[in-house]
Amino acid sequence: MTQRPTSGKRPRDRKSQLAAVAAELFRAGGYHGVGINDIAAAAGITGPALYRHFKDKQAVLAHVLLSGLEEIEAATDAAVRASEHPTPEQIRTLLTRLAAKSVERREVAALWRWEGRHLDPDSQRAIRERSTAMLATWAKVLMRVRPDLPPDDAELLCWAGLSVFGSVSVHRTSVAKRRFEQLLVDIALRVLHADLPEHDPTPGDTGEPELPLGTPSRREQILTAATDLFRRHGFTAVSMDDIGRAAGIAGPSVYRHFPSKASLLGAIGRRAGDRLALAAEHALRSGASPDAREALHRLAESYVATLTGPPELLVSFSVDRVHIDERDRAELLRIQRDYVARWVQLLEAARPELDGREAKITVHAALTVANDLTRTRRVNRRPNLAAELVALLGAVLGQ
């Protein structure tokens, strides 16, 4: 916690200092869990004094996120201005700067990912437009280095590269700063130089026969309806009446099966975890080879198949954590950690030069790339996305 100033002299760049304090509080307690008075107290000032710099809490969050974006834009501009004909070394320099920003300002990446939805529409639009423009610049630079790369493919690879740096926000694992930065740069370079598979218009055969399904239980109907509504409209915009109507029952009847919307969300998360665990088990048992690299590839295929199937995973990733009951939150975190541990164990066997923490950082980068691209409207309708995601996961993992 920041100490109170000992003199009446106002510190320089007070607005940025207040934003930094708020960023840490938002990350620790969530946007809704932090009030203006909390920010003021942590900064050693009064609530009214904070209003001299920001009109409301939304304005504080907007300042934090836009300042972080400006730093990335500045790094991009510096790299682009260096030469009209970028070299691989200049791209490495840009990635090194981005990696340093990501490691130094992990709280900004976390807020961008989890709390950006709380911004006012104008700030959301500004961040979206500026991010898209920056990614377009990255794509142009990449195509100069890889002239045979189609524009759409370049854009996909750049979005994936951005996700590598954003992945530092989904975990707390760390290594020495310089090693952390180098690890992110190496991963991003592999992504930007990945070869995407050609589109095969022939539907693939999963090898599993389609089984006839009976009528799902009322509980399952409610879960399915809630998952779809949360995915399309967001958690807070959906009521229990909406869920009941979509399931073909009265809203109050939903409470016979789930005591609250939060309990519904917990059930959706557990079902997503069950799908992942079953898919992983099938993938790891179905291979003829015990080779760790081959097992990782099968695991990547199973993850992408689950991610691009029923929307439970997308809902779990997109809903603010504060909406989940504390008991469910702990259980879902355990499920996630157990699942990530399977990847880490295989990656350590496939790449023994990585220690456990480096392997965990790499795995989180791979999963984040898949999660982000599946939710990014500019790229998630690509006809060959599933195969491309598997290829990108392989690139991140160093396969």
Image (tube, grey):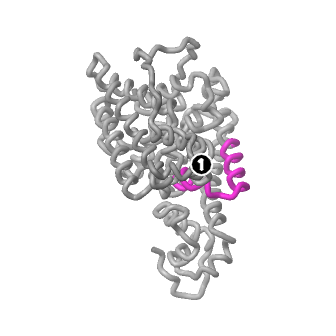
Which residue occupies the foreground of this view, 310 or 112?
310
Q: Position of residue 246 (x, y in %)?
A: 59, 41
Q: In the figure, is residue 235 to the left or right of 51?
A: left
Residue positioned 46% across, 63% down in the render: 28
Q: Is residue 136 positioned above or below 261 on the image?
A: above
Residue positioned 41% across, 47% down in the render: 180
Q: Is residue 307 positioned above or below 150 on the image?
A: below
Q: In the figure, is residue 358 to the left or right of 249?
A: left
Q: Position of residue 90 (x, y in %)?
A: 58, 38
Which residue occupies the foreground of this view, 354 or 218?
218
Q: Position of residue 36 (x, y in %)?
A: 58, 73
Residue 353 forms part of the magenta stretch: no
Query: Residue extending furthest right?
Result: 122
Q: How many marks?
A: 1
Residue type, mark 1 in image: Gly
Determine the image quadrant of residue 345: top left
Determine the image quadrant of residue 116: bottom right
Magenta residues (range)? 110-133
Residue positioned 45% across, 50% down in the render: 256
Residue positioned 60% across, 61% down in the render: 64
Q: Magenta segment, principal secondary structure?
A: helix
Q: Is residue 293 visible?
A: no
Q: Is residue 127 visible?
A: yes
Q: Position of residue 25 (x, y in %)?
A: 50, 66
Crowd class of label 1 (few under 14; some 14 to 19; many from 20; radius 10 Å): some
Q: Which residue lies under the disc numbered 1?
A: 234
Residue 113 forms part of the magenta stretch: yes
Question: Dividing the image into 4 quarters, which one contains the N terminus?
Answer: bottom left
Question: Dividing the image into 4 quarters, which one contains the C terminus?
Answer: top left
Which residue occupies the foreground of this view, 224 or 381?
224
Q: Is residue 395 positioned above or below 61 on the image?
A: above
Badge 1 element: loop
